[in-house]
Image (cartoon, helix red, strand yellow):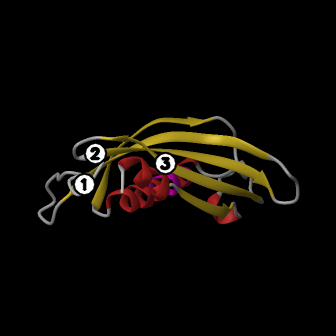
Amino acid sequence: MTVQEKIENSATRTFKAVLPNTTNHYNTLFGGTALQMMDETAFICATRFSRKRMVTVTSEQVHFKQSIPAGTLIELVAKVIYVGNTSLKIKVDIFLEEMYAESRLKAISGIFTFVAIDEERKPTQVIESFVN
């Protein structure tokens, strides 16, 4: 399987309902909760791509473009955008959807970097077993 095929096969989509226990005093999704969901979805994508132990090393360029109110649906979409020797970069977008209307809007986007580690928790190659 090629690296491009691995990227396509590892794309990850997660859906959530924004419920009151995930919102702040403005009745919108907590920023920290959004980051946790994004990191988890990015982790799943990185693991599906590499099939190795992965750890988050950075989150960057997280843009909160639109608040996400309680009572809406969100879709998190993660995709590998860079493959290094021991690291991967995953882009995650959160799309906001109304429950009872045909609307969809990109609300948040960010990039997460992961490093593959071995049993001793030392960096290891991400693509050593791939054939291009």
Task: Read off the magenta span.
Answer: 34-39
Asked if disc 3 and disc 2 are in contact, CB closer than 8 Å, the reply is no
Q: Residue at x 43, y 61 (%)?
A: 44
Vertical comparison of 110 with 130: above or below? above
Taking the image as shown, residue 121 lies to the left or right of residue 101, namely left
Q: Earlier in the sequence, mark 1 or mark 2?
A: 2
Vertical comparison of 94 with 61: above or below? below
Residue 18's mark?
none
Taking the image as shown, residue 44 lies to the left or right of residue 20, namely left
Q: Earlier in the sequence, mark 3 or mark 2?
A: 3
Classify mark 3: helix, strand or loop.
strand
Q: Residue at x 74, y 57 (%)?
A: 70
Asked if disc 1 and disc 2 are in contact, CB closer than 8 Å, the reply is yes
Q: Which residue is mark 1?
A: 116
Q: How many neighbours does mark 1 have within 10 angstroms: few (below 14), some (14-19), or many (20 or more)? A: many
Q: Residue at x 16, y 61 (%)?
A: 118
Q: Residue at x 51, y 52 (%)?
A: 38
Residue 87's mark?
2
Residues 85 and 77: in front is: 85
Going by the numbered disc 1, the residue's amino acid type is: Ala
* Residue 23 image point, x, y percent: 66, 56
Going by the numbered disc 3, the residue's amino acid type is: Lys
Residue 79's mark?
3
Gap in Å between the C-alphas at discs 1 and 2?
Answer: 6 Å
Q: How many neighbours does mark 3 have within 10 angstroms: few (below 14), some (14-19), or many (20 or more)? A: many
